[in-house]
Amino acid sequence: MSKSSATFAKSVYELFSSMRFAISLLTVLAIASIIGTVLKQNEPYQNYIIQFGQFWFTTFEWLGLYDVYRTAWFVVILAFLVLSTSTCIYRNLPSMLREMRSYREDASENSLGHFQHRAEFAATGAPLQALKDYLLAQNYRYKERPLSASEGTLLAAKIGSTNRLGYILTHSAIVIICIGGLIDSNIPLKLEQTFGLKKIETRDIPQSQVPAASRLAPDNLSFRGSVTIPEGSSADVVFLNIGDGYLVQDLPFAVAMKKFHIEHYSTGQPKSFASDIAILDKKTGKQLLTHTITVNHPLIYDGIAIYQASFGDGGTKLKLNGWNLFSPSGTPTPINGVVHDSTKLTSGKVNYTLEFTDFRPFNIENTGSEGAAPQQDARSLLGGNAVAENKDLHNVGPSFQYKVRDAQGQAREYSNYMLPILNDKRWFMLSGMRTSPADAFRYIRFPLDPDQTLSGFMRLRGVMFDPAQRAEIARRFTLSALPDGDSSPEIRTKLTDSTEKVLALFAQGGYQTLSDFIEKNVPKAERDRAAQTYLKILELSTYDAYQMAQQQAGLPPPTANEATGWFIRDSLNSMSDLFFYGAPVYLQLAQYDQVNASGVQLTRSPGKNIVYAGSFLLVLGVFAMFYIRERRLWLLVKPGRVLFAMSSNRKTLDFENEFKRHTQRIADIVKE
Amino acid sequence: MELTQTAPAESYFKRLTALDWLFSAFLLGGALYALNQYGSYMDVYEKGIMFAAVGGFSVLGWNWKPIRTLMVVVAGLSLFGINDYHADLARADQAFFLKYLFASQSAIMWMSALFVMATVTYWIGFATRSEFANRVASGLTWSAVAMGLIGLMVRWYESYLISPDVGHIPISNLYEVFILFSIITSLLYLHYERAYNNRQMGAFVLPVISAAVGFLLWYTFGREAQEIQPLVPALQSYWMKIHVPANFIGYGSFAIAAMVGVAYLLASKGILASRLPKLEVLDDVMYKSIAVGFGFFTIATILGAIWAAEAWGGYWSWDPKETWALIVWLNYAAWLHIRLVKGLRGAMLAWWAVVGLFVTLFAFLGVNMFLSGLHSYGTL
Ligand code: HEM
């Protein structure tokens, strides 16, 4: 090695082993870590684009800020830290070991004179033996070095020198922990990606079609991925989410999901999540082991830990009543569906696809505050708020979600409750609709008839929207509003015409067309009055329509009471709202056969035990450093004089006090 | 020559008095009784933890005598409170002793009041240099600790009265850990008070506890956080029982270090210097607190990692709470390096200890308030 490169190597060594370098690295690491906590990690990329705009999105992506802890630069800093700490150990270890063994018995009278903590005593007798006894009594170990007759004898004593072990243990521990962590990190994967050996899959395709370049072999050293398995089926892969895509990790065995259990406390909060699983031989399908995993109690099989992580629907079978909204009638059509599956629906000449997306057996909702739209529940098992924020929580029963997609591919999403819900003391069926997943559901409330069915409403709607019956409704309404003989035929005809008009307008587009009509045809000053008149006509004639509907179904006429009044008003509201519903059918859940799916996470982390071992050493080391105090003490026993000096690598008050105590005791001993 | 001087120092165990052994026997008796009564409900870890606690508390009591009285008083009054329930929660509002003293909520309100009174009294003692006032303040602090511990013990029992499946150790949400924080910080402080035979620092340390109490009261009256809630599945783990207290020994120590740091900074500028202990003493308390806190925080973080490995499938997920724990840890590791390796002392380290409290506070509260992650328990 040439001289210059030797000095270069030396200065690199000095730099790496210097504490300043280590502290700088730690600072950078801390700042990067903070960024990683402030910026939510591993979100879908779309969210970041919305949040930051395209420019900053690209910049942050380039810096790797969406997955800070797995970027190359972060891992490189960690690697440097390992290197720096290792060189630090290498540099300090020899002297530390020497220190631990040595008594420093070569101290001279001169050097003792320079100690900050020293004392000198005049000695009368020969206190050497008494001093030795004293040292032993104080648990010090010492070495005796006889000097010349005039120089006397040196006692070099020490206690707690295993304190140095603390340094060795803590710093080795840090290296060990980092190495364990690096083994479990995705460095090999990152390298393979860099060299194009592995490619992240971003398409939404069945896993069996994922190409080999996006698959990892079962002998992959370390991974952490998850998969959702419906009850009654099995999986032999897990998915690793990376950036905006994923990789498929093939497992050495298959996991079969027999049953997923969920238990609740009486208050509705979840109490336990558990999956009965079986491990299957991948080739033969033979069952090797059965086990129940719960949160906090994973199963470890073949070095792979299997955790309960989440749950969802695994293809619940739904029996539905389809209420045709285009040709209203009092009887629904039965429709069958399966969650995560789709079915075709034809209405007139138009084709629709029904996509069933989810089923929930319970919905714990806040029924205390009025009209609160049911919230989306995040069904992750992790964490969870131990402090319930509201006590008005109730289980409002099952709900299911589906999309209705038209021939153009446009979809609207619906969320319907199975059981009626009490609102303002009236019972309703709730159906939520939204056009984009980012929106909240807006709910339509279908009123229930006195028999607690939807038929009353549907029949009424059928009569109301049937042009052929409009004249009859208007006739009946005029008859009840203007009993015979009270008014002229012109007024009667006018009222009948107005009624037909109002009903026709309402049948075109609900309250919206009515108000548009008024705006267009009535002078501003009279609009309010006109609106009130129209609404009155509408409500009262609807009562007549309701009587007709009942009659046609062979049912007794409605009683004219407050409940019927509310039923009419609620029916009109939902008829009007239905113009914005956007689906040809309202699906009412009649029966279900629930199939759960359980989300399990599988990890292989060979570094784990290394990290634990390192952690153990770290704790030992830290306590060795703090609780074992190293102290050294010298007594130079000369004829007629005793020199006392003391030192410690920790200058604390305890040390000062101990020095004072020894000074006093030694003074006493020497005086004897 | 006096014989006593050279006689070997008596061994640790020989120095223990009959009272010490009686105390240990009392602890062991309690544990055996619990084992006999409730053994069938405990798993092997819980039994292990219980007997480890007997050992741990024995040693604690041997080394720090006043805590024995505390333990006996807390055990006696907690049992009294628990008995007074006659297994009926409704008695909390009917039975005199429960309603006004020992129902968990009453006891915790007493704790809060006593901590505030102690803070005021320490300041009176500080201002008037009255040793008597300071002694009263210490007494108030001890009483507050006792009431807080009784509150927690009774609350533990109450949770089982709600329903056996709801029952759990009361360290599972922000409300409960604030009580724990107040208790642990006071105990650590009381220990230093005795070890340094100096009560002036109380005027600086107790305000932090009062602030915690203030938060606790706001949380109680503003958010009704005192309601006992069942544990979500992720928290149903025995690791919680040791992870959380270990963390709070860390937090409490760091809080003491910071407040002593404030005292140091004032004294080093000559402000109140005549009333405060010497700078060396303040410096020493600051160092010891951080050293103890660092040790326990290390353990707590490791226990957290072990727990995470069981609950979340990975010992380190770079979850915000984990990451901030690492930042706190690195911060104090740097502090210790600067002091021990570079030998730095003085105002700069005191400032750093004060700033350290804010970093710690963020890790403790800020993460729950501002960041989201897996540690969602205790969301404000
Ligand atoms: C990952 C980086 C590092 C961490 C987390 C770390 C951690 C620690 C800890 C916790 C202590 C205990 C403090 C005490 O009580 O004495 C310590 C002490 C010490 N560290 Fe580090 N350390 C790191 C890197 C380094 C490096 C690179 C050096 C090289 C100069 C170094 C030199 C020392 C020394 C000399 C001591 C004091 C030993 C003694 O006085 O007994 N450390 N370190």
Image (tube, coloured by chain):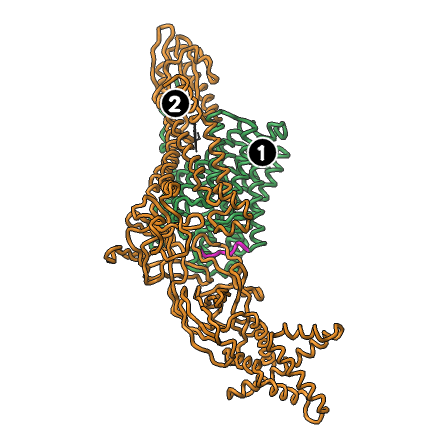
Is A120 above or below relative to A339?
A: above
Secondary structure state at the residue bearing disc 2: helix
Q: CA distance from mark 2 to mark 1?
A: 44 Å
Do the residues at discs 2 and 1 belong to one chain? yes
Q: Amino acid at mark 2?
A: Thr
Residue located at (68% from left, 91% from top): A483
Which chain corresponds to the colour orange? A
Question: Quadrant location of ligand 1?
Answer: top left
Residue that numbered label 2 is attached to: B4
Q: Of callouts 2 and 1, which one flags the residue occurring earlier in the amino acid sequence?
A: 2
Query: Is B303 in front, or is A217?
Result: A217
Residue bounds of the magenta highlight = B224-231
Residue that numbered label 1 is attached to: B262
> What colour denotes chain B?
green
What is the crowding at mark 1: few (fewer than 14 residues within 10 Å), some, or many (at least 20)?
A: many
Magenta-drawn stretch contains A504: no
Query: Is residue B224 shown left or right of residue A160?
Result: right
Residue B22 seen in the current view: no
Residue A460 quadrant: bottom right
Query: Is A629 in front, or is B356?
Result: B356
The chain ID associated with circle 2 is B
Magenta-drawn stretch contains B226: yes
Quadrant of image for the C terminus of chain A: top left
Residue A177 seen in the current view: yes
Residue located at (66% from left, 78% from top): A535
Q: Amino acid at mark 1?
A: Val
Q: Position of residue A107 (x, y in %)?
A: 39, 13
